[in-house]
Amino acid sequence: MSRITLAELAEKLDATVHGDGSVVVHSIASMSKAKEGDITFLSDAKYRKHLVECQASAVIVKEADVEFCQSNALIMRDPYLGFALAAQALDTTPAPASDIAPSAYIADDAIIGEGVAIGHNAVIESKAVIADGAMIGAGCFIGKEAKIGKNTKLWANVSVYHRVEIGEACLVQSGTVIGSDGFGYANDRGTWVKIPQLGSVIIGDNVEIGANTTIDRGAIDDTVIESNVIIDNQIQIAHNVQIGSGSAMAGGTIVAGSTKIGKHCIIGGGSVINGHIEITDGVTITGMGMVMRAIDEKGMYSSGIPLQTNKEWRKTAARVHKIDEMNKRLKVVEKKLVD
C-alpha cells in the first residue's frame, strides 16, 4: 500500500494545502465511498453539496469550493487533473514482469538494455532491441529487428511483429497485435492474390494502446502513430494510417487504410472512418460517427440516429424510405410557387 502525506502529494500535484499537511493518505476513492485515509476530488460544482457528508481525509478542489470542505483539501485549478496525478502517486498496479524469467526465449543476437524485465514464455527474436527499463510481459512475442523503447511496458500476450518500432514510455495492454499484415489483395479474375505488406509500424513516445487492439503494418510505407496518442480497446487501425500527436480514440473504432488523422483529434467509440481520407487537426467525432469524406475544418461532428423508443424508431425508419419521394413532391410544389 502506498502512503503519502498531503504536503508531499501537494508538491507532486503543484497544489496548495488547506488544513493539515501531515495527514497521510493511502488510496483514491469516490466521494460517496471515501473514508479516513482516502483522498477524493470534486471537479463539478453541482456535486458540491456532497462535501458536507464526505468522510475522506482530503479532497482535491478548486479555490471556489474550498470553503465548503469539511476536511483537509488540496487546492488546484483542475481537480480532475489532480485526481489523475494523485492516482499515479498512489498506484499499486504490479509490474508486467520482474527480472528475466528463465522460461523466456531471447535470441543470441537480440540487444537487451539495462534493467529490462521479461516475463515467462516471452519470445525475443533475432536482432530485436529492448531498451533500458522496458518491461515485456509473459507470453509476449517481439519479432525480428523490432525495437521497444526505454521504459515501455507490454502486458501479457502482446505481439509485436518484425521491424516494428515502439517509442519510449509507452504502455500496451494484453492481447494487442502491432504490425500484422494490412488487408492488401489484388483480384485476378475472381482469385484473391495477396500483396505482401512491406512497410512497418512506427509508434512515438508516451503512447498508450488498449487491450485486443490491432495496428496493421503498411503496405509499402509505414503506419505511423505519433507521440502522446491514446488508443482504447478493440480498435482496428489499418495499413498506412497516420494518427497525429495528442489524439485520442475510444473503443471499437475502425479506421480504414491510408487515412490521415490530424493532431489533437478525439474519436468517439464505435466510429467508422473511411479509407484514403484526411481529417484535419482539432476534430471531435462523437460516438458511432460514420466518416465517409475528408474533414478539413476543425470542430465537432456527429452522425447516426440517437436512441429512440422502438415505436418512434419504426416511424423514423419508415419516413427515411420515403425521403426521395417527398423530395420530388417538394420540388413540384416549389416549382408551382415560383411559376
Image (cartoon, rainbow, N blue to C red):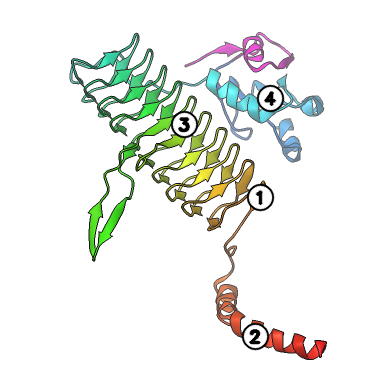
- Residue position marked by numbered label 2 in the rendering: 328
Label 4 to label 1: alpha-carbon separation: 31 Å
Residue 233 is situated, as x and y percent measured from the top left of the image, at 43, 42
| 82 magenta-colored | no
Which of the two labelled residues, at mark 4 and mark 2, occupies the earlier sequence position? 4
Q: Nearer the viewer, mark 4 or mark 2?
A: 2
> Disc 3 residue type?
Glu
Label 4 element class: strand
- Residue position marked by numbered label 4 in the rendering: 60
Label 4 to label 2: alpha-carbon separation: 60 Å
Label 3 element class: strand
Q: Nearer the viewer, mark 4 or mark 3?
A: 3
Q: Nearer the viewer, mark 2 or mark 3?
A: 2
- Name the image quarter holding the C terminus: bottom right
- Residue position marked by numbered label 3 in the rendering: 208
In the image, residue 183 above or below residue 115: below
At horizontal 67% and vertical 48% (from top left) the residue drawn is 297
At horizontal 67% and vertical 21% (from top left) the residue drawn is 58
- Residue position marked by numbered label 1 in the rendering: 300
Q: Which residues are magenta?
A: 1-24
Residue placed most toward the observer, 45 or 198: 198
Mark 1 burial class by Cα count in 10 Å: few <14, some 14-19, many 20+: few
- Is residue 272 left or right of 14 when viewed as pictured? left
In the image, residue 227 above or below residue 256: above
